[in-house]
Amino acid sequence: MHLKNENLYLRALEPNDINLLYEWENNPAIWRVSNTLMPFSKFVLEQYLVNAHQDVFTAKQIRLLICLNNHKPIGTIELFDFDAQNARAGVGIMIDAAFQEKGHATQALSLLCHYCFEILMLKQVYCNISASNTKSLHLFKKIGFVEVGLKKQWNKLTHNTYEDEWLLQLCKN
């Protein structure tokens, strides 16, 4: 499956993406955003890739690689908690730091939302974003997501410090 525009495309994960996934998933700089607490082994990631061929209705999730049109991978975008009965799914995105603030996340998120509404026939997509993650809040609002709730002291930062998290939704009219 290729979802594309004039600048980039989204594609399914391939076995040869393992080293790139290993690098990104084990980058402590993004762990707080992804709620990761420990490194992933290559074995665990390889097992994930073995099952990545399952469709979203079976796996309840899908992760796609974001690639520039020159085939350079720059990040991932995913659906999680896919719920066909209620026609909704969660959305997450990660762009490599070297490619941020160039409009790639906006384009990738727009492509994924089109796929969700026009191909998967979802009614809504949602995301959870820490209150301090102003870049992600701006990105999702730019696409049309709206804040529908604030989860107070939702994410633990340190032993005694917690941070609020926003719930945002985008609904198909």
Image (tube, rainbow, N blue to C red):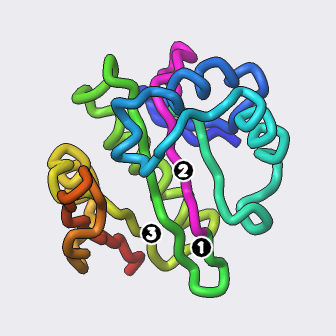
Contact flag, marks 2 and 1 (Cβ < 8 Å): no
Please provide the residue range marked out in magenta: 67-81
What residue sits right under mark 2 in the picture? 78
Task: Answer few, some or many: residues within 10 Å of disc 3's Cα (few below 14, many 20 plus, some between 14 and 19).
Answer: many
Which of the image's four quarters has the N terminus? top right
- Could you tell me residue 96's position as x and y percent? 39, 25
Q: Dot 2: what SS? A: strand
Q: Which residue is located at x 77 percent, y 31 percent? A: 43
Characterize the local packing of mark 2: few (<14), some (14-19) or many (20 or more) Cα atoms within 10 angstroms: some
* Disc 3 element: strand
Q: Inspect the image, locate mark 3, and give the three-letter code of the amino acid beneath it.
A: Val
Quarter location, residue 28: top left
**Res 125 label:** 3
Mark 1: which secondary structure? loop
Mark 3 and mark 2: Cα distance apart in space: 11 Å
Please check the rendered image and state whether residue 79 is part of the magenta-colored stretch, yes or no: yes
Residue 117 against residue 24 in the figure, above or below: below
Residue 165 shows in this picture = yes
Find residue 121 and name its label. 1
Residue at position x 68%, y 65% from top? 60
- Look at the magenta stretch and give its main secondary structure: strand
Q: Residue at position x 66%, y 78% from top?
A: 84
Labels 3 and 2: the sequence-earlier one: 2
